[in-house]
Image (cartoon, rainbow, N blue to C red):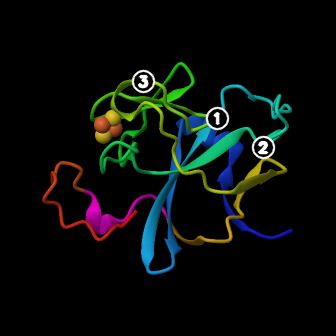
């Protein structure tokens, strides 16, 4: 078994969400974990996909505009099993990443591969290498607007 040990399912549930930064090629990626409300106890998904995965990992960027869904000090805001975008309010299913409402309707968040083993969450995505917990310190201004010189690329 391989993969970088990120945190525990208990921590994600207690905090509501949990973020880390990873490297993909030449770019840094922000990723956040959220509990999957449909599978609180790690049951089997109806379609057999991601069976028993009580948390999910998503790239920390709204599909509509360059907006973080998880913010430092706030976390990811969830409501009724969805992550709510702080900018225009589109809601993404925490288990599927899909959105059927608002500006981001018809889109899906990019999923990152993780595995849960013995209550711990491991990063198993071949494309990403773990860098650090939380979001990058040097790019914490969500209000920089469209002229932001963010070094992040998506
Ligand atoms: S930026 Fe997220 S819905 Fe517009």
Q: Which residue lies under the disc numbered 2?
A: 50
The quarter of the picture where the C terminus appears is bottom left
Locate residue 3 relative to residue 105 in the image: left or right. Answer: right
Between disc 2 and disc 3, whose residue precedes?
Answer: 2
Q: Nearer the viewer, residue 65 or 79?
A: 65
Give the x, y percent position of residue 75: 42, 41
Numbered disc 3: secondary structure: loop
Which of the labelled discs sits on residue 101, or is there none?
Answer: 3
Farthest residue toward the top?
80
Q: Mark 1 sits on what residue?
A: 95
Marks 2 and 1: CB-CB under 8 Å?
yes
**Which of the 4 quarters of the picture holds residue 30?**
bottom left
Residue drawn where x is 27% and y is 58% of the image: 140
Q: Is residue 152 magenta?
A: no
Sequence-wise first label, 3 or 1: 1
Q: Position of residue 62 (x, y in %)?
A: 39, 44
Mark carried by residue 107 = none
Ligand 1 in which quarter: top left
Q: Is residue 127 above or below residue 93?
A: below
Q: What residue appears at the point 44 percent right and 51 percent down from the top-left corner?
A: 60
Crowd tier of the residue under label 2, counting other residues whose Cα lies within 10 Å: few below 14, some 14–19, many 20 or above: some
**Image-quadrant location for residue 42:** top right
First of labels 2, 1 by sequence position: 2
Instruction: Describe the element under mark 1 as helix, strand or loop.
Output: loop
Q: Nearer the viewer, mark 3 or mark 1?
A: 3
User: Residue placed at 63% from the left, 36% from the top?
Assistant: 96
| In the image: residue 148, left or right of residue 5 | left
- Between residue 47 and residue 137, name the one nearer to us: 47
Q: Quadrant of the N terminus?
A: bottom right
> Which stretch appears magenta?
133-140
The Cα atoms of the two marked residues, 2 and 1, are separated by 9 Å
């Amino acid at each position: 078994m391989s993969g970088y040990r990120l945190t525990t399912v208990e921590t994600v549930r207690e905090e509501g969400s949990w973020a880390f930064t990873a490297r993909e090629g030449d770019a840094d990626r922000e990723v956040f974990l959220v509990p999957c409300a449909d599978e609180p106890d790690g049951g089997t998904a109806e379609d057999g996909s991601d069976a028993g995965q009580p948390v999910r990992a998503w790239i920390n960027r709204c599909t509509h505009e360059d907006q973080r869904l998880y913010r430092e000090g706030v976390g990811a805001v969830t409501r009724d099993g969805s992550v709510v975008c702080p900018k225009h309010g589109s809601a993404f299913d925490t288990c599927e990443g899909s959105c059927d409402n608002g500006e981001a309707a018809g889109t899906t968040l990019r999923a990152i591969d993780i595995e849960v083993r013995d209550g711990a969450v491991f990063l198993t995505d071949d494309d990403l290498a773990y860098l650090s917990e939380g979001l990058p310190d040097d790019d914490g201004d969500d209000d920089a607007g469209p002229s932001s010189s963010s070094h992040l690329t998506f």
